[in-house]
Amino acid sequence: MSLSDFQWASRVADIAPFHVMALLGRARELQAEGRDIIHMEIGEPDFSSPPQVIEAGRQALADGHTGYTPAMGIPELREAIAGHYQKAYGVKVDPARILVTPGASGALLLLAALLVNPGDQVMMADPTYPCNRNFMRLFEGQSQLVPVGADSHFQLNADHIEQHWNAKTRAAMLATPSNPTGTLVSLDQLTEISQAVNAKKGALICDEIYQGLTYGVEAQTALAVNDDAFVINSFSKYFGMTGWRLGWLVAPECAMPELEKLAQNVFLSATTPSQYAALAAFQPDTIALLEERRAEFARRRDYLLPALRELGMSIPVTPEGAFYIYAGIDHLTDDSFGWCQDLLEEEGVATTPGLDFGIAGARTTVRFAYAASIDKLEEAVERIGRFIQKRA
Amino acid sequence: MSLSDFQWASRVADIAPFHVMALLGRARELQAEGRDIIHMEIGEPDFSSPPQVIEAGRQALADGHTGYTPAMGIPELREAIAGHYQKAYGVKVDPARILVTPGASGALLLLAALLVNPGDQVMMADPTYPCNRNFMRLFEGQSQLVPVGADSHFQLNADHIEQHWNAKTRAAMLATPSNPTGTLVSLDQLTEISQAVNAKKGALICDEIYQGLTYGVEAQTALAVNDDAFVINSFSKYFGMTGWRLGWLVAPECAMPELEKLAQNVFLSATTPSQYAALAAFQPDTIALLEERRAEFARRRDYLLPALRELGMSIPVTPEGAFYIYAGIDHLTDDSFGWCQDLLEEEGVATTPGLDFGIAGARTTVRFAYAASIDKLEEAVERIGRFIQKRA
Ligand SMILES: Cc1ncc(COP(=O)(O)O)c(C=O)c1O
Ligand SMILES: Cc1ncc(COP(=O)(O)O)c(C=O)c1O
């Protein structure tokens, strides 16, 4: 038997592998050889899941919660998420509008399937989280990348929507806090953007997966100003639960039957023990722990930001959320992927090249994740400084 | 804000909700009212996950296995799956060709994305697992339903492939044991089918999610005769792990980089504690327990099959796998959905109407799942007999 003459579907060639994966693979090789590698490439908190969540997961297993759940998620969790919006943000969300998904990834998939016909466009900032573009391509849609800069805090704004919306644009997509830039969209801006999208009769997707990870600013939700936004969230980042593969989607009521139908086909349901474990994520003692972790992330940001600026990197807008700093290094290179590779080989610091996030700044930017202890970050800064010196 | 003028993507209207969901919802309502309901509609083993697996899951959590894993799955599990093919089927599979997925559902999604361009067709038996058709539609492909009957054991065969293959056909899809019919494809047939698909330069997808659940026949794998088949499997059914959301895909080597890229975007990775727990699924003592359960399923089939035949239902081919009996009731009704609804209301027996599985037998067939104890099945048969009597 042979598949040698078989051509994969065209979408496959259009989806680029992440450059960071090559770096991650190489970093692991070097580590296996005994090299000391500092990981600033990974989009994952370095904290384990909260012990309360782990214990709840163990209990769920002991209690035999191992069967399929309803496609929308267990009712208790949908209610707990609604309770969290009420308590943390003072926003009332009907649990019937909450769909529990396998990670925010699952929510992104459902939204692309729901909103995008072949040829339809979805507007998003360049730079953006790389999977966003690929989800649109998967469903034969197109991502409409709008280059954004310091003037709009590396975010889309209402002017962008008005200027770039065309006959094929169906939706605009925001992420606040943003991956890779760590910048936020304020509620005032969100209101303006919502109005602009609404005037175009489009849909607004708001990725709030880094919600709760803000420094010096209170966390917010688009739901406070726009009840018709599609809001994506996750237990991965603030709640430290990446491997549990659990997220959620809040959608307008009219979309729920359609989303349920899609979820029934695509996932059947999200992982059951994860859903029960996540009930413990909203307990006051868990939140207290997560707030300590947030303070630690803030200290790291407060250390790393001026340190990178002192190395001459261009970080014109102070990142106030997530755990990323997106730095311009055009004074150092016009091949940031090569720069990242050399930095890894020579100094053992792993980072993510701009190439993964878009087109405009692809070759002159690097993303630094501060999901590592301050000790490690200090060591990294020293190594990066030496690396830059050597090449000067 | 308002989404009132927004039209969902066209695919959404083409994906029908499962009729069984309406029945399941009603069954739960009746149960909440205190009615005694016998569930023969659900495609889920009534056994909990094996205690060894539950304990391994609890241990994985205690050990802090809560982060993202590689998109392909943890190496230990890929090796354990390869070991299982060797031990249970005498087939050598390189772990590099095994991709761990969020359920077989995840594998089906990846394959649709990999193989299907807009307008491409994938041939499959009518009746078939309902999500199959919808996965193709999701990615703008079409399912080419070939009505099958008793003469081909309710399965596609090489003749079907030759007769129905057209310029747009890209792949053929089998399921053995099949949902809804419980029938198998023999290795001889698989060889013939593989040759026919190969002659057309197409791809062969083989869904082996009910592998291991065979009665009076040894379980087999398509990999024994076709190394280039895309083989889907799952921990859901034989291993009793539905809620863990874990499955796998074996694919030709040349497809692995493409599949990895797709998995990185679509899932990031499968649930981590589930992956570690699944390592315990292949232990000899776990397998011994699962074989006892298999024997119990066999006893149920041996009870239910003649009982339904005695009620006059048409079951021309003995189902030898899964936990389903697909019965013709054209002598009773030409509206099997209505019949199932009445059976539920009047006698409290929940079943799945043929409508969910295809077109040809949609209105004259019913699927009975025997994922319930023999006591319950006996009670169900009595009730169904009474129901038929009343309407005669
Ligand atoms: C902006 C953004 N959205 C979505 C995701 C998906 O995360 P998950 O599926 O773990 O919730 C990520 C993960 O890094 C992300 O950075
Ligand atoms: C034939 C078939 N394939 C695939 C699946 C998907 O199962 P899972 O995603 O739980 O592995 C099912 C579930 O019922 C099925 O019957």
Image (cartoon, coloured by chain):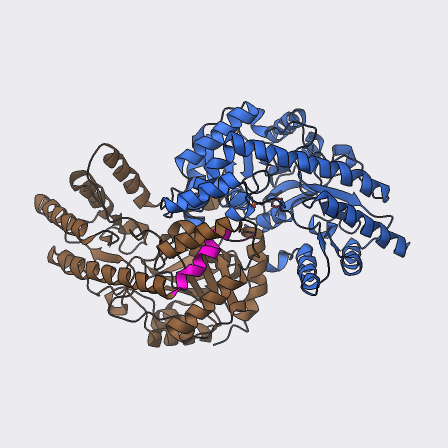
Chain colours: A blue, B brown
Rendered position, B302 above or below B40: below
Task: Please report the bounds of the magenta region as a residue range.
Answer: B268-283
Q: Kindly report the secondary structure that dominates the magenta region of the rendered protein.
A: helix
Residue A36 lies in quadrant: bottom right
Question: Can you see residue B83?
Answer: yes
Direction from residue B386 to residue B75 in the image, left or right? right
Direction from residue B163 to residue B390 in the image, left or right? left
Q: Residue furthest right?
A: A392
Q: Provide residue B248's location: percent of width, then percent of height.
A: 46, 60
Q: Quadrant of the N terminus of chain B?
A: top right
Rendered position, B195 above or below B51: below
Image quarter where ligand 2 lies:
bottom left
Counting the numbered discs, the total is 0
Residue B270 located within the stretch drawn in magenta: yes
Q: Provide residue B274's location: percent of width, then percent of height.
A: 46, 53
Residue A216 located within the stretch drawn in magenta: no
| Residue located at (54% from left, 63% from top) | B75
| Residue located at (40% from left, 52% from top) | B54
Rendered position, B91 above or below B171: below
| Residue located at (24% from left, 59% from top) | B297
Q: Nearer the viewer, residue B255 or B148?
A: B255
Q: Provide residue A385's location: percent of width, then percent of height.
A: 85, 49
Q: Residue furthest top?
A: A90
Question: Can you see residue B271?
Answer: no
| Residue located at (65% from left, 45% from top) | A129
